[in-house]
Image: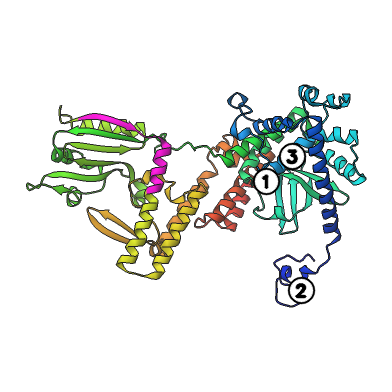
Amino acid sequence: MTIGRNDLCPCGSGKKYKKCCMLNAKPSREEYKKKHWSDVNNSIFNKFIEYISKTYGVESFEVAFHEFYLYGFNQNQYSLNHKDAQFNPNSPEMQLFFPWMFYEWRPNQKVQLENNHHQDGRLREGLTIGQSLELMGNNLSKDEREYLLSCFKTTFSFFEIIEINLDVSLKLKDIFTEELHLVLEKNATHGVRVGNLLYAKIVRLEDIVTLEATCSIVIDPIYKIHVLELKDKIQKVNKVVNITVDILRLHSIEILKLYRSIYERVINPPMPILKNSDGDLLAPHRLIYDIQDSHVTFESIYRFCYGNARDELIDGAKVDNMGRVVFVQFPWLKGVSGADENVGSTVLGNIQIDGSVMTVEVNSRERYLKFNRELKKLMPEAGTWKLKYKQIESVESFVAKARNIEIKRDTENVREIKRDNGKGRELKRDSDKGREIKRDQASGIDRDTQNYENKGKDSYKGIVKSSKVGGKEQTVNYNEIMANPEVRNKIQSMLQAHWDNWLMLPIPALGGKSPIDAAKSKLGREKLDSLLTSYEITSESEPMLGQTDDFFKNLRAKLGI
């Protein structure tokens, strides 16, 4: 039986194993072998660096890294001087780059002729640096030569994590060859979870398997879909079902290109294509109108605020001595009917009337045009209004502004609770919520501001939500609402309806097929499995009511995976 570092020590001391008998424990046979081959690897590494510097010149590191970095990208957009393509020995990608340079990179003839001091003809035969080093001898020991030959038998591939034995090993499955490997690793068992992918190179030495190289990022299961598509292409091109290591080598550049594109998306995620609830592309518009009479304009357009009575809006407005509106703000709402009536209205924009100026904010070109059409119907008289100018804001600026608004609101909620009721328990919870929002932003995920439809609309933050309806403050306790069984059942039934509908929807990641149709083929079922695994991992960090382990098991059962 394997004892984990954090398990209680079997001696009965009550201490953790790592702080007790582990301190005096002798290394196992496998640990001894791994330590030995790790020392051999370090020795070979130093000889590689010396050999490359003398034979190809130190500039070859720059050339190799440039090729490694730019695979999969438009090379016309980069050059050797591009900051991200510069060779940097301190880069976390060095743990992947050096083994790639040693065992995969083949210096072109120009590099060899310009920098080969030994003028050995064998260097011009398209060999890798590792193969050249092995042929040249260079005072390699027996173990060093064995290590090199073992590395020649494998190549880089994508592996799925099947099982994790913390501080001991990883069980990996090569997605291309479908071979299983029990890899002795300690550090690599941390920060990953079952279902994650690794771009790596393994090496088998005697009866142990270790990671010769691995990527510096944790790859989400969603990217397995792209790996499966490349696997399908390789099978068809080579007219085989079972992919061998030799076949993988023929497609090593394509595999590296795929990794580089995944790496770029993980490190520098592209701005997503954002759409509003109408399906329009987000294009925030700020419209400034000159208006002849603020009160007449209000009386004409207050109907834009669907479901709110005129008098309620007047209560929240500023009026003159004659009772005429001079300033008012209200949302442009679209009413809903049928089963969704209890959900509320959709915010289409925000309207402000201030003296002779009316400002309207909408989030798409289509809504701007729609507002103008409706305005012409409600105020057809010439001279009563005129669009003075429109300002189109970038989506990036719009999103950043929305996030800043949410953080400000959260801070105000904390102050409001402290000032009004001083309940330490509620203050602590609300403060925790604030830290969660900032933490989510740092990781690039902002759950509370993903719905950009609600810009300008109160959101549920912490426990207390304050809102204005008709100018009157209302306070709602969010926890009390969510504790209501009827509310929970309603939300759960809505989520279930969403997933039932999802089964029939065309999914871009599935090549436009619905999950039901994709599940009819082996490749489709594998893609679905990676998609659902990604959803499961996300649901653990961002829990959603009803999305339990059993929920995903039932979903898999419906799809036959």
Answer few, some or many: residues within 10 Å of disc 3's Cα (few below 14, many 20 plus, some between 14 and 19): many
Q: Is residue 474 above or below residue 140?
A: below
Residue numbers of the magenta segment:
386-404
Asked whether 527 or 155 is in front, the reply is 155
Quarter of the figure with residue 294: top left
Q: Which mark is residue 10?
A: 2
* Relative horizontal placement of residue 533, taking residue 28 as reference (left or right): left
Percent x, y of residue 495: 48, 52
Percent x, y of residue 411: 37, 57
Q: Is residue 402 above or below residue 82?
A: below
Label 1 SS:
strand
Which amino acid is tagged 3? Phe
Q: Is residue 397 magenta?
A: yes
Q: Are marks 3 and 1 in contact (CB under 8 Å)?
A: no
Image depth: mark 3 or mark 1 in front:
3
Report whether residue 370 is seen: yes
Residue at the location (91% across, 40% down)? 139
Residue at the location (83% across, 46% down)? 43
Asked whether 535 or 46 is in front, the reply is 46
Which amino acid is tagged 1? Leu
Residue holding disc 3: 98
Percent x, y of residue 390: 29, 31
In three-dimensional space, the C-alpha distance between marks 2 and 3, rounded to whole angstroms, equals 42 Å
Residue holding disc 1: 197
Which amino acid is tagged 2? Pro
First along the sequence among labels 2 and 3: 2
In three-dimensional space, the C-alpha distance between marks 2 and 1, rounded to whole angstroms, equals 34 Å
